Amino acid sequence: MRGVLDPGNVFFSFPTMMVADDLKPIPMERERRLASCDRVDMEAHREWAEAVLRVPEAASREQLLAAYEYARQVPYAHPGVSPEVYFCHSLRVATWSLRVEGAGPIERGIVGLFHNVLETSPLTREELAGRYGSSVANQIAALTVDRARETDLAYKPAYYQILAAGPRAARVAKIFDKFDNLFLLGLNPNEEARTRYLAEVREFIVPMARREVPEVEPYLGDLLRDCEIVGYFGTRRL
């Protein structure tokens, strides 16, 4: 981030920006993610830097900057994309999480940055706890999906109940994780998997967004309908 903006060396902040303020029409947002399947989404890095600049306390900005620098060095392993490309998803989730109003911007930003790190990297819960504290580590552990039980009808309700009972930062990260993934849902040729994903978002994420981030609910509803209409698009360009 120091190559984009350095929030540790500034003595001002921008006015708060709501998540919905910066969302473009769905086809444009989808095209951006399609383009970033093969290259780093530099806009994600810029948006993160600007979101950090809006955090008023210099010490908080420095903590977020340090977390970013650490997170970008993690050796993520995700099929078909490099660690640098995959990190941009985490960065978008973290940026949106940071923009949400309310107390605890540092925790929201850090949980967003590392929300999927236990599933996609060698980092452990103990390492996260040692660096960021047990609350952050526990939230990231709670966010980590047990893929072996993903289609178990009893598993997902229990999973979301755990998130509902925990700190808000994990719920915000989950909302934006699903939100960001929806733009590329049509890359999955498995119609049953796409249908199941949309049903999960409608059952669990939409009510959660209504409570936690109500300003994105209308866009989320439009995005769900768009995903149904577009279906499988099969290539990386529409």
Image (cartoon, helix red, strand yellow):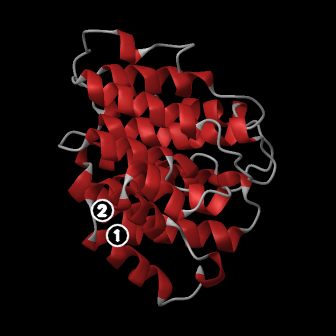
Residue 146 vs residue 196, the one in the foreground: 146
Answer with mark 2 or mark 1, whichever residue precedes in sequence: 1
The quarter of the picture where the C terminus appears is: top right
Residue 45 vs residue 65, the one in the foreground: 65
Which residue sits at x=33%, y=60%? Answer: 135
Left or right: 169 as drawn, with respect to 211: right
The percent position of residue 90, horizontal first and vertical second, equals: 54, 43
Dot 2 surroundings within 10 Å: few (below 14), some, or many (20 or more)?
many
Left or right: 171 as drawn, with respect to 75: left
Which circle, 2 or 1, is nearer the viewer? 1
Residue denoted by label 1 = 163
Q: Which mark is residue 208?
A: 2
The percent position of residue 31, horizontal first and vertical second, equals: 64, 32
Q: Are marks 2 and 1 in contact (CB under 8 Å)?
A: yes
Under circle 2, the secondary element is: helix
Tell me where residue 10 sits by quadrant.
top left
